[in-house]
Structures are given as C-alpha cells and as structure tokens.
C-alpha cells in the first residue's frame, strides 16, 4: 500500500501484511515526523461450529444492512423457513416497525417483540407459530415505543433486546433477526445480541457504498463485542445480462473470500411470493430463487446434503 507523509509529502510503499493489527501511527523515515495511520481493515471473520438438530447451542444470525432494498426480509424469511424445513427449530425475530415478516409469512400475530421487551406478556404468549419448526416474534409500529424506551435509559440501553431474548437461549437451534434499514437503537441492540452477521448486498454500486459505511459502523460495535463476526456476504439480484454484475462479484470475492455466498439470482417469483403469504419453497419450489436459498441454508448449516 502507498502511504504519503502529511508533513513532507514523501511517498512510502508499505507491505500491509507487516503492519501490526493495533498500529495507529507511523513515523516518516524522511522527515522523522509521526502521523496517523488510517487503514481500512476488513471485519474479522469468526468461525462458527455447525449446529446439529436438537443441540442446546443457539446460533444467533442477524440479517442486516443500513441500506434498504437489498432483500433483507426476503433473505431472513427464506433462510429461516429453509432451516425449519431441514428440521431445525428456528425463531425469526422482526425488529422493523413495518412488520413485513408477518405479512410475508401470511400470519396475523396477536403480540410480538414489543410485548416481550416491555414485559407485558411472556415469551410463549408473544410467539407466533408460522410453520412447522418455525416461530415468529413479530415487529410492527409498536416498536417505535421500544426505541424511545431504549433512548430514555441512562445506561445499558444497547442490551435491552438481549435481555428480553434471554429465555430463547437453548430453546431454538437458530435465531434469525431481521433488521430495518438505517442505523437506529434497535439495530444497535441486534448487533449486541447476535454472534453471526449476514449482509445482503444488491449487485450495484450504491449497495457497495452502503456496505462500506455499514462495516465501519460494525467496527465500532466490535470494540465492545469482539465475538460479533461477519460470517456471510450474500449478493442479491444477480442478473448476468448486466455486465457490471460480474465485475462487482469479482471485486467482492477478492475482498471477502469464503464469506461470500452463492448469489441470489434475480427472480420475479421472489417478489410475487409475499403477496400470497408464502415462502419461496411453497410458492415456486423449482425456481432459481428457491434453489439459491436452499444453497444458502446448506452453507449456514454447514451441511451440503440438506434439502437436496
């Protein structure tokens, strides 16, 4: 990498691999002055052990990106439904005030995450059985009040959702959390709860910019939660007819390596399924979208034989 001294403008070529991970300053060999060393480091990958059906270890996966329109809810729902079809006990948590997960699954919850966080109802009363092996903690407009409650706390506000979801541990094999676009108190709470992060990225330039900004925010959370790991980068809306798609895929692949998932191809069936309250496996099980999400389930569960 090329580093320019801000004092004497001397250019230095440095092997980035030899820079210590905690290095924040460098000294110019020409003028002898020290200056800040700003290096964009990728978020560290945390290896997670695969979960066997019936184990008491709960894997907590957040599907998040501050930019909207990248397929977060579609991914959260079809990942959760796919894991449930594979025989795992799965909880889907919707932290968006729009509450779209309920609509997309065709269910009408009587309660959800808000009532659990405020303590109005028990966990059992807040859960909605959406499918076999799949339960939902619904979001909705009432979550706006939860955001205000978090903001009013003098300390510990970032742990509000974690404390509410504590009874979930050891009940489910997977907890998949769907977040809203943007960066709000609930998104921060999710990042203090999950251990694995999945980021859907639409294959377009603006999404890459959103990814870069989001990862900088994640780094600030990791100072307090080093166990939070970026596990999956999921390209969405892949359209091989568009030339820039391949270039963007190659660029992401060079940066993220094994964390890069098989892309979700653009498929009109994925946008049609929510109108019928169905997952892609129910609405069009043979389409490209269903095949791609099955592949994602295999990667997450670390089992290539699932749903085959």
Image (cartoon, rainbow, N blue to C red):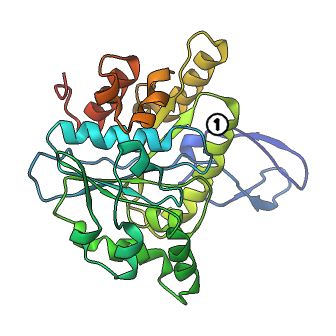
Q: Is 58 on the left or on the right of 7, as rendered?
A: left
For image coordinates 70% across by 53% down, the residue present is: 38
Quadrant into which the C terminus falls? top left
Q: Residue at x 42, y 39 (%)?
A: 75
Q: Quadrant of residue 12?
A: top right
Query: Is residue 195 found left or right of 53 in the rendered image?
Result: right
Of residues 287 and 64, the one drawn nearer to the viewer in this rendering = 287
The local crowd at label 1, few if under 14, some if 14 to 19, many if 20 or more residues have their Cα within 10 Å, is some
State the residue lying farthest toward the bottom: 154
Compare residues 169 and 25 and report the one nearer the observer: 169
Q: Toward the viewer: 34 or 126?
A: 126
Residue 252 % position (x, y): 55, 30
Task: Tell me if 48 is positioned left or right of 103 in this view.
Answer: left
Query: Relative to 308, is 57 above or below?
Result: below
**Quarter occupied by residue 195:** bottom left
Viewer-proximal residue among 213 and 206:
206
Horizontally, residue 79 falls left or right of residue 103, namely left
Q: Position of residue 5 (x, y in %)?
A: 83, 50
Residue 109 lies, with reference to residue 286, above or below; the image says below
Instruction: Give the image location of residue 43, x and y in percent.
Output: 50, 49
| Residue that label 1 marks | 208
In the rendered image, the vertical position of residue 244 relative to residue 187, given as above or below: above
Q: Split into 4 quadrants, where in the image is the N terminus?
A: top right
- Does residue 115 lie above or below 259 as drawn? below
Q: SS for tag 1?
A: helix
State whether residue 270 appears in this view. Answer: yes
Instruction: Name the outermost residue toward the top.
Output: 241
* x, y percent for residue 225: 43, 66
Q: Is residue 265 visible?
A: no
């Amino acid at each position: 990498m090329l580093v320019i001294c801000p004092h004497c403008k001397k250019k230095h070529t440095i092997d980035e691999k030899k820079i210590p991970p905690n290095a924040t300053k460098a000294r110019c060999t020409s003028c002898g002055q020290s200056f800040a060393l700003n290096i964009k480091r990728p978020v560290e990958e945390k290896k997670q052990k695969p979960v066997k059906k019936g184990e008491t270890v709960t894997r907590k996966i957040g599907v998040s990106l501050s930019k909207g329109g990248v397929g977060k809810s579609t991914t959260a729902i079809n990942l959760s439904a796919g894991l449930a079809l594979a025989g795992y006990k799965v909880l889907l948590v919707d932290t968006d005030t729009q509450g779209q997960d309920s609509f997309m699954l065709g269910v009408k919850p009587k309660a959800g995450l808000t009532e659990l966080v405020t303590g109005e109802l028990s966990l059992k009363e807040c859960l909605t059985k959406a499918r076999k092996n799949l339960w939902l903690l619904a979001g909705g407009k009432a979550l706006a009040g939860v955001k205000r409650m978090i903001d009013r706390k003098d300390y510990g506000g970032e742990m509000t959702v974690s404390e509410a979801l504590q009874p979930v541990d050891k009940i489910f094999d997977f907890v998949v959390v769907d977040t809203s676009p943007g960066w709000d108190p609930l998104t921060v709470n999710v990042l203090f709860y999950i251990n694995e992060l999945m980021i859907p990225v639409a294959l377009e330039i603006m999404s890459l910019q959103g990814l870069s900004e989001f990862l900088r925010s994640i780094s600030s959370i990791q100072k307090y939660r080093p166990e939070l790991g970026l596990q999956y980068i999921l390209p969405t809306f892949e359209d091989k007819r568009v030339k820039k798609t391949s270039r963007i895929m190659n660029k992401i692949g060079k940066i993220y390596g094994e964390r890069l998932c098989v892309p979700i191809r653009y498929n009109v069936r994925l946008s049609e399924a929510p109108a019928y309250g169905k997952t892609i496996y129910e609405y069009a099980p043979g389409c490209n979208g269903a095949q791609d999400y099955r592949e994602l389930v295999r990667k997450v569960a670390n089992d290539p034989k699932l749903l085959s």
